[in-house]
Amino acid sequence: MKKYLYILLPVLFCFLTACSPYSNLKQTQIIDSGKYYRIYKENDNQVRYEIYNPEGKIALSEKTDRPIEINTIRGDIIDIGFGMGTGITIHKYYNANENIFSGEFTNVLTNSDKLIAYIEVSKETPFENRKVVVQNIFDKSLFYEEFKLDFSNVDTPVIEAEFSKDGASLLLTYLSGEKQTQTSEILDLTV
């Protein structure tokens, strides 16, 4: 009788755990986190990311199958980047203190806690009429400037871009003209 009991107990245990309501739960693991965000790996080859406000409440929760990178820039500004393939990344920003999200930006050169610089590209003629746009990340009515430069006809003509510490200028190094001459220029952002 004891032999049957020793055999019956493990079989019963296996049966009960196989029928458990917890056996089919999706398991998630945190793959990255910061003060205002978490990225979770889901079972279905997707990631779920959550953006939190300063009180710890969820401001945004979405799933994506795109490569994602989230960084904190200068305090309470979150940079959410989605890889779109072929080197293109779409950026969206979140200001935790103000609890606001920006629009989406591509071809981002650099950013600060208030400004973003990017290349505006025409969809019809991507190598023509490109310009550098510098604007307020969350409200372009506060600051918006366009700069037309002599970019070379290459995919990524800008080599380096950086705002000055006081935010009054943008240092830009780019390839210029048909000979792809490396050119450095300081763009004045004072109005």
Image (cartoon, rainbow, N blue to C red):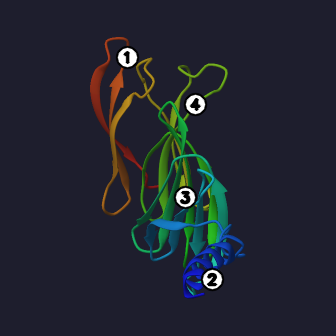
Left or right of 152? Residue 146 is right
Q: Residues within 10 Å of mark 2 (few under 14, many from 20)?
A: few
Residue shown at the point (41%, 74%) measured from the top left: 75
Which mark's residue is nearer the viewer, 3 or 4?
4
Residue 2, image x, y percentages: 56, 88
SS state under label 2? loop
Left or right of 155? Residue 159 is left
187 over 7 or under it: above or below: above
Q: Which residue of the protein is positioned furthest toward the top in this rendering?
A: 178
| Residue 121's disc number | 4
Residue assigned mark 1: 177
- Looking at the rendering, which quadrant does residue 22 occupy? bottom right
Q: Nearer the viewer, residue 43 or 184?
A: 43
Disc 3 to disc 1, C-alpha distance: 29 Å
Q: Residues within 10 Å of mark 1 (few under 14, many from 20)?
A: some
SS state under label 4? loop
Q: Nearer the viewer, residue 99 or 4?
A: 4
